[in-house]
Image: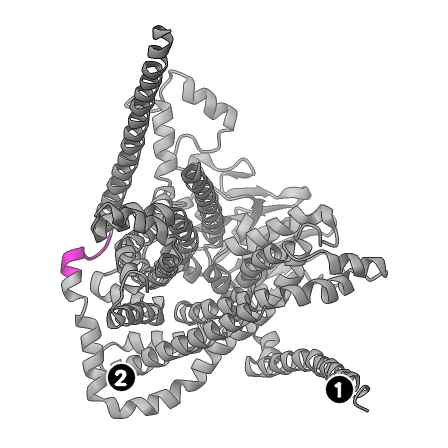
Amino acid sequence: MADIAMTPPSAGQKELGVRTASYIAATRRKQMYSGILLLIFVLMMMSGFRIAEERNAGDFLPGLRQFFSFPSEVVSEGWANRANIPGYVAQFFPSLVETVNIAAVSTLIGALAAALVGLLASRGLARWPRLIPVFRRLLDAMRAIPEIVIALLLIYILGGGPVPAMIAIAFHTTGALGKMFSEVAENADQKPVEGLTSVGATWGQKMWLGVIPQVAPDWLSYVLQRFEVNVRASAILGFVGSGGIGYDLKIAMQWGGGKYDQVVAIFLMLFLTIVVIDQLSSRYRQKLVKGS
Amino acid sequence: MSVTDPPMTMQANVLGLFAARRRMSFLVPGVILAYLIYIFFAFDIPGLAQRARMDNAAILMSDFWIHKTHVTRDNRTGAVTVSIDGEARATYPAGKLPEWVTVAEDQTTISLPGGHGVVYDAAGGAQYRHPDYGVIDVQPRDGTLDITLPDGPVPDWISLGDNRISVTTDQGRFSMTRNRTETFRYKAGWALFFFTLDSPFHGKSPGELAALAVSGDRVDPARSNLSHMVSDFWNNGLWRHKDVAWAIFETILMAFLGTFAAAIISLPLAFFAATNFTSIWAVRFGMRRVFDFVRGVDSLIWTIILARAFGPGPMTGALAILITDIGTFGKQFSETLENIDDKQVEGIRSTGANAVQRARFGVLPQITPVLLAQVLYMLESNTRSATVIGAIVGGGIGLLLTQAISTQKDWEDVAYYLVLIVLMVIMMDTLSGWLRRKLIKGDAA
């Protein structure tokens, strides 16, 4: 009896001790692994930075001291010639409109194409279910090619102007939005689609009447977000290629000193446009998400 | 009356909604159409048809995957050179011409596919032999060209001018002026991709190369064949594999450094912008405006400012990505922080932990998976941005790409870079997707 009474606690204690020890060991091991991972990460960051600094024309610390010299030069020149800025704003306004137009029309075309390809790539909704992988790979490929590549190739063929940038951004937008559209559409309620199938609706009717009304708020929200991204992309493509306010900025920058009042005007316009578009779009997106 | 009234108004309401819906369903496409028509004229799409250079498109498409070998005779000196794409660096040495060119005495014989052929004869003239059409004979005489064609009308693939002739067939192209006689032979594929003409391994089949790599007979006694091969490939002067590999590495490096440094910097800052961690309204407001400002000053502007301060190179690109992403991450992280579960923080607080300890043990463990997912998504998207930023600051594959495009002739290089960029993006997408699954699931388990 005494034996029996004695053994369970000691076995339990032993078990507890073993458990505690193994728990502590496991925690230690986990900490060690995390520590090693962290160390590798820090080493990668440091050596990466060293390599990047070595291959850079200017070094980090001297550059840091100069960081404000260019902006202050630009701002002081812009301030000295502040009387000219309203004139420049008026002069560059058409280019700004062009930049925004490139973004808007490419978002629009990209979204329309993405709606079609996205639905064709959605499980349960596709017109030809066997071709789903094909359309998915197509979207992946469209996303993978950076806009600048398409834009520069098209400039060689089509010459300067807004069209190469428009096509390039629309192409990329199709890939980016198509994936998101298809993810949303796959989560849509299938019942309206089944109802429409039972009355003999065509694929187009099923999508237009059964799926699009359900997914429209989410899709619109993604489209607005993409529009924000595309305004920036359109300005950058103008700078690298041609068309819009980015191109004017490049010309003004190439002049260097003496034209910095133009640079200030363009910076201001670009900044304000992006902030306004971001604000409007985020306000409208919140409304969309709450409304749905 | 009072009984029928509510259904009547309901009906009117429903009808009204239907009408509004119908109006919308015409209005929205109408507005879109009107906008597209406006763009059609604002972007001068009708004029585009005239400006478009479809011949450029044809050059581009064919140069992507076809190379041409030039056989050129300088008619003043009589010297014949054979080179790929007319590049001086890719000129065949005299003793090692391709087998379809034979130089005997003063006569050069070039055989083209399909039974076509060109002979540069000793008298300074040339004959193009077309198996169906006949022989086109061109002889210089008193400073002009004396051209003899077979009988019949001149076909449209022969272009005749004062003192010049050019013959363009599917098999090749032949042209002659007083100064120069030139024949192009086209071949699919990228020329000299592995070894340039000065390498002893040029023109060897994969089997021969494999045999050479393992055999003991050294081509160059100083080093083994394998290391010789690797070095000849790596230092290929035409395709510059070494520079291209560095450029791809620089691009990935920019994305990697920029993204992770931005995440490390914005995580502590995000605490100051989150409602549940910073009770002082002014601090929160200030921090949020900083994030908004950084995002509002577009990456283009940041990149330009940074390029001025740090000069061209990958570090500038990394810093540009870093600054832009601080804005994005700051906003995302502070939103994530506002959505955490407070119970864990309270639990840690009850043990007397200070703010840093609460953040480390109460907050970080719950948000790590979300943060990692956000950071890795950004890494993917920044790999693409790094190409563009490289083109602006002058670093990485973006720089090589813009340089190759601006020469307007190295289209095979452009195709090479394009393939590499797409592979790089797909690789980074796959890697980040794999890491996301691994890290996030690993943390949950």
On the question of residue B297 being in view, the answer is yes
Q: Which residues are magenta?
A: A56-63
- Asked whether residue A59 is drawn in magenta, I would say yes
**Up-down: is B443 above or below A70?**
above
Q: x and y percent of residue A78 in the render?
A: 23, 84
Is residue B72 covered in magenta?
no
Give the residue number, with chain letter if any, for mark 2: A261
Question: Does A130 sit above or below residue B8?
Answer: above
Q: Is residue B93 visible?
A: no
The part of the image, by quadrant, that contains residue A59 is: bottom left
Identify the mark at residue A38; answer none if there is no mark.
Answer: none
| Residue positioned most to the front | A1
Identify the residue at image location x=65%, y=79%.
B28
Q: Quadrant of residue A249?
A: bottom left
In front here: B75 or B353?
A: B353
Residue B231 appears at what percent x and percent y? 34, 33
x then y, percent, for residue B378:
40, 54
* The C terminus of chain B, quarter of image: top left
> Mark 1: which amino acid?
Thr
Task: Identify the secondary structure beneath mark 1.
Answer: helix
Residue at x-position 71% and y-position 61%: B155
For this view, does A106 lie left or right of residue A61? right
Q: Is residue B128 left or right of residue B280?
A: right
Q: Disc 1 marks which residue?
A: B9
Which of the two marks, 1 or 2, is nearer to us in this view?
1
The kind of residue on which mark 2 rests is Asp
Q: Chain of mark 1?
A: B
Q: Report the chain holding disc 2.
A: A
Q: Nearer the viewer, residue A150 or A156?
A: A150
Where the N terminus of chain B falls, by quadrant? bottom right
User: How far from the left and from the top, in percent, is residue B25?
Assistant: 70, 78
